[in-house]
Image: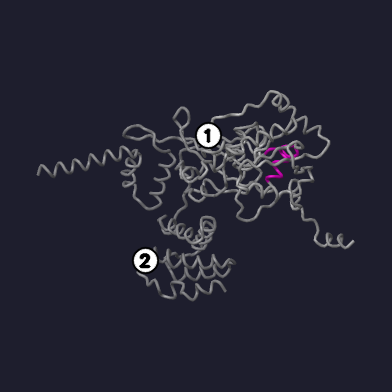
Amino acid sequence: MKLLDITQKYGCATYEYPFAPYKVADGFRGKPEYNYDKCIGCTACAVACPSNAINVELNKTKDKLVWRFDCGRCIYCGRCDEVCPTNAIMLGKDFETAVKFNKEDLIETGELELQYCVECGKAFTTKRLIAYCLENFKKVGWSESVIKEKTKYITTCPECKKAKSVELVSKYYSKGVKK
Amino acid sequence: MSKTYVVPTEISELNKVQDKLNLIKDIKRSFSVFRIDCGSCNGCEIEIFASITPTWDPERFGFKLVASPRHADILLCTGPVTRHMYYPLLRAYEAAPDPKIVVGYGACGSTGGIFHDCYSTWGGVDKVIPVDVWIPGCPPHPASTIYGLATAIGILDQKLKKVEHKDGSDKAPKIEDSIFGNTLFEREVMEKAREMMGYLHGRELYKAYLKVLKSVEDIYNPVKTKQVLQDAIKQEEDPRFRECMMTLHNEVYLKHLKRFKNIDKLHPSICFTKKEVELAYD
């Protein structure tokens, strides 16, 4: 009888979870939630991800950049959340991630439009990233004319930029020798 | 890993999806769960044993851990299947009576997780034997364990579906206007907030601090800004936020204001003195 008194005092310790929703603690690291509209395709999350759950690569026809997240491989470390410049990926509260029979259900993808280099025509980043940079220049207070000048620079791929600057430098030095 | 296991025909014939569904439907007793550790880090084991405690009580649904694979209906496989645990896993798989439900548990069990390209692992249970249910997580929360097992026997429905986002606009996401007309200020506030409180609380601090600054009428007046901030800090419950807000004011706001105005950064009517910062914890 004493035992019954003790159980009555403390009540039921079991969570009613599957029959009632379970509230997770503050700061719980659940499934990362991806906001496609905010994603600029900078690939910072793919670089930071320690288990390669996030991959960013070209699609089969090589005309779009595909952001791909595999929930099965995610270890919920929150590094993608930490590095994302636009908060497009944030750890949520979702813990009900089990799937049955089909593993593909764990996957989330997002396709982004590619930006081609104005010099050589090779794809090197996404259009959204360029738009985001230009928007940032505006907010920092650059004038329209300066931005127009920089737009050409920013839409050139790194290799062409390198070649161009080498060209400029060699021109400058050859002039110096002639004098 | 070159060797691949081919499921013998006498096992695969008895393990079709329909057989498994029939087992779930016709079973008139508890589900016996056998746990196989295929080289896991012990994190998943701890969570499995946490989820069989009275706090979660999976025996409500009839899940019972058993000591031998010969008694098992469900095989709970944890770990990325290391070289040494390859044969024990196969022995347990073949010993379990047909039909059997195989669950890949944890990030390692379902896809290999952090060890997916490691030289000495197979990278997931499903590379070796056919798996029916995947429970991701590193390790899975007891609640997700309960959810996964309940999904396996059809009590709950699966929530996750493959999501494909396509054909979005090329427009950049919105960037909010700056208080000073230069987003470098916001950037520096974010940087300092993250440096002091980490990415999670730093984001909250950034939001709280900017909310206060937006309520200031004349942002170029440091005396009034300090007063408004002081009122806001008094209402803040967390002492860490109180101190960090003062530091943000002293180190970032006043530094940026110096571009527009000639001010004395150390004047007590403008900045928070050392004593005031110390009082944040009282």
Amino acid type of the residue tagged 1 in the rendering: Lys
Quarter in which the N terminus of chain B is drawn: top right
Depth check, front residue: A151 or B281: B281
Residue furthest out toward the left: A179
Taking B198 as reference, is B18 left or right? right
Taking A166 as reference, is B86 left or right? right
Considering the numbered disc 2 on the image, is that residue within a helix, a strand or a loop? loop
Tell me the subunit letter for badge 1. B
Vertical placement of A85 versus A121: above or below?
A: below
Residue B138: in magenta span: no
**Residue A117 position in % (x across, y down):** 35, 35
Cα separation, mark 1 vs mark 2, equals 47 Å
Residue B145: in magenta span: yes
Question: Which dot, 1 or 2, sits closer to the camera?
Answer: 1
The label on residue B166 is: 1
Q: Name the residue under label 2.
A: B258
Taking B201 as reference, is B76 left or right? right
Residue at image coords 87%, 59%: A4
**Residue B107 position in % (x across, y down):** 60, 42
Residue at image coords 70%, 49%: B49
Considering the numbered disc 1 on the image, is that residue within a helix, a strand or a loop? loop
Amino acid type of the residue tagged 2 in the rendering: Lys
Tell me the subunit letter for badge 2. B
- Residue bounds of the magenta highlight: B144-158
